[in-house]
């Protein structure tokens, strides 16, 4: 195992000095408060964008909150490509606010509209509630593309951790014709195989915020029925095939219990003919992309994600071209 980056070593030391506890030993309220508090301690302030507004769409269990971002240099009338973003947090934590700064920077750096979703969380709403919300919101975005000033033929899906899992599932659903096919999938240390034992997770580097025990804690609250662990909608690695899904950016970290499954998913995608860009950060932990105040590499990682999105958008057919092709 490689050593951790000095920024991470300093973060671990500070956590120990402060008596920080892992999520799995906290109450749900404590865990959510601790996760939310890291926005102030771990993240730089959000960049300015030309538009940042909340909206709602109809969902299977009531309205779903979304947050729309348009880049700083975009005119009000410009029709933009779009990233549909799903936040991480083990399906139990996280919100529109926890990933707000990340979405602002991706909008600016990828020069796209970003629409983030506040999907229902476990344990109050276990599987498949989060996915059902994401499907409903994605369909609403496509249907309202004209009003939202986005190109319906140029929508990518992405997320980190639990959000990366949801993005991978949407990519599979697009391949199968259940929803319009996204043009790209951004999978940042995704959870893609929930049918694992504690011993299967690793590495469990000392002092890390997310360990195998944390993942088991998240999984057992999200997937109430054991049989759900093998459902491809919870474990996209269990899908019969990954062929035909959109090009993927897969990010893995060396000190992350999800590293092995992320690597395996990238390899499976590539083996089945999907174009994959794999980025491995050997000295970084799970969650690094939102640690911009304390980890120097975090902003660089955000910019790599944005670069991959720009390339995907540049190669996608525009709405008018797609309409003419379909005639």
Image (cartoon, grey):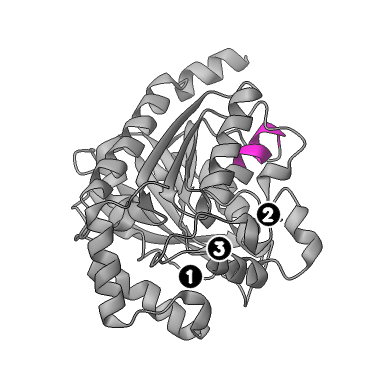
**Quadrant of the rendered image containing residue 10:** bottom left
Crowding at mark 1 (Cα within 10 Å: few <14, some 14-19, many 20+):
many
Q: Earlier in the sequence, mark 1 or mark 3?
A: 1
Instruction: Specify whether residue 172 is painted magenta.
Output: yes
Which residues are drawn in magenta?
170-177
Task: Please indicate whether residue 132 sits to the left or right of residue 99 in the image.
Answer: right
Instruction: Estimate the x, y position of residue 92 in percent, counting from the top left.
Output: 54, 70
Task: Please indicate whether residue 218 sits to the left or right of residue 93 in the image.
Answer: right
Q: Earlier in the sequence, mark 3 or mark 2?
A: 3
**Residue ID for mark 1:** 93
Instruction: Specify whether residue 239 is painted magenta.
Output: no
**Quadrant of the rendered image containing residue 70:** top left
Q: Earlier in the sequence, mark 1 or mark 2?
A: 1
Crowding at mark 2 (Cα within 10 Å: few <14, some 14-19, many 20+):
many
**Residue ID for mark 3:** 212
Q: Is residue 66 above or below residue 190?
A: below
């Amino acid at each position: 195992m490689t050593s951790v980056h000095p920024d991470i070593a300093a973060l671990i030391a500070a956590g120990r000095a402060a008596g920080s506890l892992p999520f799995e030993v906290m109450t749900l309220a404590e865990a959510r408060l601790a996760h939310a508090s890291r926005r102030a301690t771990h993240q730089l302030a959000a960049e300015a964008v030309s538009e940042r507004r909340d909206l709602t769409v109809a969902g299977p269990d009531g309205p779903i909150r979304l947050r729309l971002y348009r880049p700083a240099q975009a005119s009000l009338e410009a029709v933009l490509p779009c990233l549909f973003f799903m936040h991480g947090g083990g399906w139990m934590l996280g919100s529109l606010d926890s990933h707000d700064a990340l979405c602002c920077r991706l909008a600016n750096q990828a020069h796209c509209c970003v629409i983030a979703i506040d999907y229902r969380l476990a344990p109050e709403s276990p599987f498949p509630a989060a996915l059902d919300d994401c499907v409903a919101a994605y369909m609403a975005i496509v249907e309202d593309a004209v009003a939202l000033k986005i190109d319906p033929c140029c929508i990518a899906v992405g997320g980190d951790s639990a959000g990366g899992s949801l993005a991978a599932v949407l990519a599979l659903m697009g391949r199968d014709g259940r929803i319009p096919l996204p043009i790209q999938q951004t999978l940042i240390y995704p959870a893609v195989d929930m049918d694992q034992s504690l011993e299967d997770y690793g590495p469990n580097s000392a002092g890390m915020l997310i360990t195998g025990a944390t993942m088991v804690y998240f999984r057992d609250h999200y997937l109430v029925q054991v049989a759900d662990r093998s459902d491809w909608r919870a474990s996209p690695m269990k899908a019969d095939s990954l062929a035909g899904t959109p090009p993927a950016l897969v990010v893995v970290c060396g000190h992350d219990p999800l590293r092995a499954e992320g690597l395996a998913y990238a390899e499976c995608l590539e083996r089945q003919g999907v174009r994959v860009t794999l980025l491995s950060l050997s000295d970084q932990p799970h969650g690094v992309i939102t640690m911009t105040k304390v980890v120097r590499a975090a902003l660089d990682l955000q910019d790599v994600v944005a670069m991959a999105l720009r390339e995907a958008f540049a190669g996608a057919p525009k709405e008018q071209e797609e309409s003419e092709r379909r005639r």
